Image (spheres, helix red, strand yellow):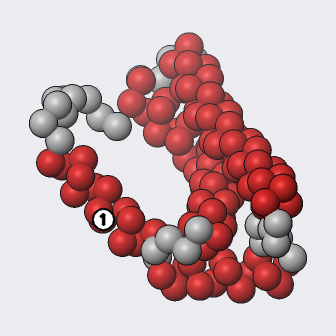
Amino acid sequence: MKELQRYMKTYHEEMNWEISGNHYEEAKSSLLHNYMLFSTEVAEVAEELRKAFNQTNKWINQGKGEAEAFEIAKANIKEDIGKELADCLAYMTKFANYFDIDMEDAFYRKMEEVKQRQNKDVGISR
């Protein structure tokens, strides 16, 4: 993850896509703009999932079993959902780099925090 963050820092600089902000209002505007772009990418992940569910239903209606139909649908969206997830990761690293956050460290600390929670939802996949 550290290597990815270094790569994305250089990439954003080369593309002139950094979050700007020498002044509060400029930073605020840039952060909000980038957050909207990030949110759009998250919505595009949802759109790919919707496509997979619709395709699964189509294949089921054509006589395929549910598991087989879903595997076909997943294969059909794999490339596009991968691109959308990559877009999300690019924005996440942009925010992490802006706030000087080591995402790898933050990730492991957060997962440990979740593991230690007393009120865990049991049997619910997140």
Mark yes or no: residue 59 visible. Answer: no
The residue closer to the viewer here, 59 or 102, is 102
Q: Secondary structure at mark 1?
A: helix
Residue 77 falls left or right of residue 116: right
Residue for point 67% across, 60% down: 91
Relative to residue 78, is residue 43 depicted above or below? Answer: above
Q: Is residue 112 left or right of residue 39?
A: left
In this picture, is 87 found above or below 61? below
Q: Amino acid at mark 1?
A: Tyr
Position of residue 67 measured from the top left corner of the image (x, y, whole percent): 39, 30
Q: Does residue 74 sit above or below 28 in this rendering?
A: above
Residue sitting nearer the eye, 38 or 29: 29
- Counting the numbered discs, the total is 1
Pointer 1 residue: 108
Up the image or down, 10 lies above or below 87; here it is: below
Which x, y percent locates residue 62?
57, 17
Residue at the spot 30% in from the left edge and 65% down from the top edge: 108
Q: Residue at x 87, y 76 (%)?
A: 16
